[in-house]
Amino acid sequence: MKVEILKPCAYCAGVNNAINIALKARQEHHDKDVYVLGMLVHNNFVVRSLQKQNILSASNINDIPDGSVIIFSAHGHKEELDEVAKKKNLIVYDSVCPKVLSNIKLIKENLQKGHEIIYIGQQGHPEAEACLSLSEKVILFHKNILKNYQSISDDSPLVINQTTLNILDIKDIHEQILKVFPNARIANEICASTRLRQEAIKNIEKDVDLIIVVGDVNSSNTRRLLEIAQQCHPNIQSIMISDASELDKASTANKNHIVISSGASTPMEIIDEVFNKINY
Ligand code: SF4
């Protein structure tokens, strides 16, 4: 049996950066409570290992004691939270991924020029919430629905998206939008880490008979990997697990070629455990 780990694998640069910032905050303020607002990155293993280092989690900024350290997540945060952090005298560390930040900058530049923005993303995802919080002129396109469609008066709105979307679906969405707004300016902002992982699944060898996606159920880019596997290879079995404990030995029995893909916030350690469980 051949077992292959698809590349890229393990943490992307943005996740690495966020973890390093959290550790730096802990190191620089050993006398203070340090909280991450929400999940630093969408992986429970990472959240638990930060908690072991006394980096706590809070789901609401108001639950964080005044004067503590707050770390904003890699996905970005709603703009109004900066003001709340100031009022609470919190020491702020922002672990936003540079790619998410560059999208936020592009949206702001366009808003300043008077443009409206069509934002393709998942309602409730922190990255989408961060972008939507910038202005009511940022309109969400979600699940094939463009809300407040009639409210867009800009002939050439900017069309931009969450960084972790599906590379196949986004082409259709752009076509739908261009039918209504032929002069819309499309910025395809799926990040390289997400795109390369999806392309690796799309281009697997013909003899593969099992695709295993390893990652957290909360991780958007991991769920997209499973979607791509099912869309591109409907005749190949594909499963998603968060770690080796969820791997049923029966599902790998009698297989000839297994590929393991992983989300951008999946630690290498977990991928190795899955690989070893299949092989032994
Ligand atoms: S998946 Fe992409 S956008 Fe998200 S943290 Fe990684 S590099 Fe940044």
Image (cartoon, rainbow, N blue to C red):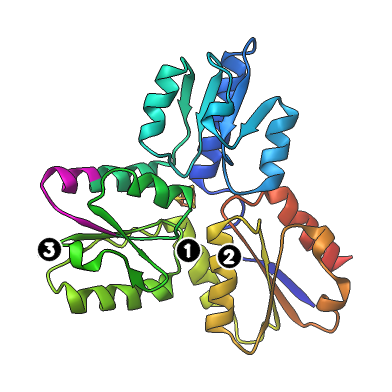
For label 2, the SS is helix
Identify the mark at residue 223; answer none if there is no mark: 2
Residue 186 is situated, as x and y percent measured from the top left of the image, at: 23, 64
- What residue would you read off at disc 1? 196
The mark nearer the N terminus, 1 or 2, is 1
In the picture, the quarter occupied by the N terminus is bottom right
Where 48 sits versus 263, above or below?
Answer: above
**Label 1 Cα crowd, 10 Å radius (few <14 / some 14-19 / many 20+):** some
Q: Nearer the viewer, residue 151 or 226?
A: 151
- Examine the image and state in which quarter residue 79 appears: top left
**Residue 206, image x, y percentages:** 61, 86
Residue 238: horizontal and vertical position, in percent? 67, 77
Closer to us: mark 3 or mark 2? 3
Dot 3 alpha-carbon crowd within 10 angstroms: few under 14, some 14 to 19, many 20 or more? some
Q: Is residue 211 left or right of residue 105?
A: right
Q: Please report the residue visible at 37 percent of the width from the left and 25 percent of the height from the top.
A: 83
Residue found 43% across the figure and 49% down from its top? 127
Which of the two discs, 1 and 2, sits closer to the camera?
2
Label 1 to label 3: alpha-carbon separation: 30 Å
Compared to 130, does 204 lie above or below? Answer: below
Q: Residues within 10 Å of mark 2 (few under 14, many from 20)?
A: many
Residue 60 within the segment the image draws in magenta = no
At x 51%, y 38%, the residue is: 73
Residue 117 magenta: yes
CB atoms at circles 1 and 3 under 8 Å apart? no
Residue 186 left/right relative to 5: left
Mark 2 belongs to which amino acid? Arg
First to last magenta residue range = 108-118
Q: Earlier in the sequence, mark 3 or mark 2?
A: 3
Residue pointed to by mark 3? 156
